[in-house]
Amino acid sequence: MLSKEVLFTYYPKYTVQRYKTLIRVFSCLENAWNAEFDELKKTDWDNNLIHEFLTWKDHIDEPALIYELQKNNIQAISILDNTYPEILKYIYDPPTCLFVRGKLQKQEMSLAVVGSRKNSFYGQQAVESLVSVLAKKGITLVSGLAYGIDSIVHTTTLRNQGRTLAVLGGGIDNGTIYPREHVPLAENIIQNGGAILSEYPPGYTPTKYTFPQRNRIIAGLSMGTLVIEAAEKSGALTTAQYALDNSREVFAIPHNIHNINGMGCNNLLKNGAKMVTSAEDILEYFHLNEEEKTSQAPLFLSI
């Protein structure tokens, strides 16, 4: 049997806010699941939404969902599970459920590294220089499996025998992973001790709305976010903003003032982001002993 938290994420109109509303009114999702129409009217849902939810709930094929998860070797970890990442619970809107392939740890020292999908050679050099050191020190590198900087983060980590997590904006089954060209990279991440994960169930096609949402998870899984390369308006800056909103540190590397693809990083630095010119800048900030591996480093939970 799947928990109601897991099942609810399959609801086509699921949102974290709607989950919170049900919890506020009914204390637990089990009570909400058994509620009738008049009871559900205690929420801020309109009548049409309530009817849709009740109809959907009555037609769930739970055995089929379980079979699909097992077939794709996907774990469904609800926010109530003991294995849910501790650090992610502290963001404003943690996902109700994480769908995971690979190994997801409850506690680990992790850093988000993000940047442009159309990276420059300078951006590639920066990732390879910084991530190669951080990976060897045992820091888990978190990114989004996208083209450009994200994929370089994952491949550089793997090349240095490190651990990396990829957060997707859609389903993590091989039939849905986006971009399609990165299916082999996703498999490589899993086979080498990392994980791919998403708040969206198998078969869920990513949209322009789900990518910004997944960025909050990238930031939320990490003690800090390092922006490698970003234009003045960029998805990487969205991730940085989520980090700031949840009291996590933001790092950025400096760029040539004439490089439009570096304006986002330079603006972050002007507004207080920590400048990074070497991996030691990050290691020193988190008081990590360079002589020791950091995979067992304690989390800073006063965030």
Image (cartoon, rainbow, N blue to C red):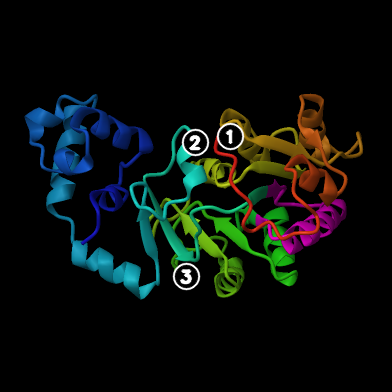
* Residue 11 image position (x, y, % from top left): 27, 47
* Residue shown at 62% from the left, 61% from the top: 164
Disc 3 designates what residue?
174
Evaluate whether residue 228 shows in this view. yes
Q: Characterize the local packing of mark 1: few (<14), some (14-19) or many (20 or more) Cα atoms within 10 angstroms.
A: many
Whether 236 is among the magenta residues is: no
Evaluate whether residue 202 shows in this view. no
**Residue 230: which quarter of the image?**
top right
Element type at mark 2? loop
Disc 2 designates what residue?
91
Whether 116 is among the magenta residues is: yes
> CB atoms at circles 2 and 1 under 8 Å apart?
yes
Which residue occupies the foreground of this view, 53 or 221? 221
Distance between the Cα atoms at labels 2 and 1?
Answer: 9 Å
Element type at mark 3? loop
* Residue shown at 69% from the left, 48% from the top: 114
**Range covered by the magenta-colored residues:** 113-140
* Residue shown at 60% from the left, 73% from the top: 192
